[in-house]
Image (spheres, grey):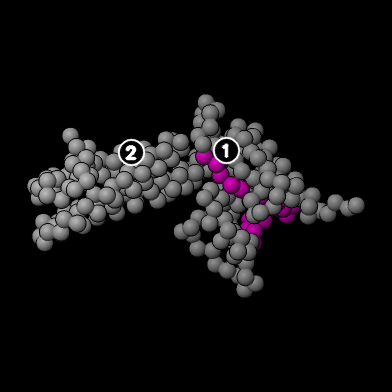
Amino acid sequence: MKYPEKAANGDAGEFFFAYKVASVLKWPCRLLDIDIGIDAQVEILNEDGTSTGSFVAFQVKATNVEEQSCRYVSERQLAYWRELDLPVFVVLVDLSKERMYLHHVRLDKAYPPTKKGAVRIDFDVAKDRFDKKSAKLITAAANEAALAHIEKYLSEVREGIQSIRGEIARTEAYGNPSELIETMQERTSLQEKLAQAQALAGALGIGSDRCKDAEQELDEALQSLRDHMVECNMHRDWDDDGEIARFVAEGR
């Protein structure tokens, strides 16, 4: 059995990457046995060595050619990385000099395709070199991804808040109690979305301020809805099952 040079370089690159992450950053690095477009997963730790709950994915590209500062990947692979929930970095490992460089794959970055249907990943050998400062770059990418997940829930909450305010304004002008009742009933879904955002923020240690702002805005919008329904005597005239009265009581 032969051990092809390409396979040897690939293995050396992955082991070197894991060694550097563990020795320089002191973070756990898990090399993946199955090649699905990701070679490793790194867990980000706080300065005291406790887990932040955030993970980052890495694809390692190794070379023995000095001064090589780019790699080519397929458009399909790039699309796969962009679809992942985790932030993804492509790592160029220069085995000849025992150095490595990081490139954060971003949704807002343009990767022009080549004539052969690949895309080029460029590395700045001066700015992208891996060292202790890379911890800030990796952590920032993880925080950005975490906030994006939290914002998915909060954006729905904010849309619901605008819907509540809009419905109050419409009924003040034209009067449609049934639509106000539907708006009131939708509050449970908004509160669940907010709770999901809060749970995620608590687990990841980021975004709690945004959740607090959204919670305050939602509480204010619901209180405005209660006040308006009381002013319209809906808790007396449109409350066959007592649901409006229970809603009004929530604000006391």
Between residue 133 and residue 30, name the one nearer to us: 30
* Residue ID for mark 2: 209
Residue type at mark 1 is Glu
Residue 76 seen in the figure = yes
Label drawn at residue 13: none
Left or right position of 240 against 117 = left
The verdict on residue 178 being magenta is no
Where does residue 160 sit, x and y in percent of width and height? 28, 52
Mark 2 → mark 1, Cα distance in angstroms? 24 Å
Between residue 218 and residue 138, name the one nearer to us: 218
Q: Residue farthest to the top? A: 48
Where does residue 172 sit, x and y in percent of width and height? 11, 56
Q: Under tag 2, what secondary structure?
A: helix
Residue 251 seen in the figure = no
Q: In which quarter of the image is the C terminus?
A: top left
The residue positioned 90% from the left and 52% from the top of the image is 1
Left or right position of 61 against 7 = left
Question: In the figure, 201 relative to 187: above or below?
Answer: above
Label drawn at residue 43: 1
Where does residue 170 sit, x and y in percent of width and height? 15, 59
Q: Residue farthest to the bottom? A: 115
Q: Give the range drawn in magenta.
A: 54-72
Question: In the figure, 158 relative to 75: above or below?
Answer: above
The verdict on residue 60 being magenta is yes
Q: Is tag 2's residue or tag 1's residue first in the polypeptide sequence?
A: 1
Left or right position of 195 against 87 = left
Residue type at mark 2 is Asp
Between residue 204 and residue 234, name the one nearer to us: 234
Left or right position of 81 against 244 = right
Q: Under tag 1, what secondary structure?
A: strand
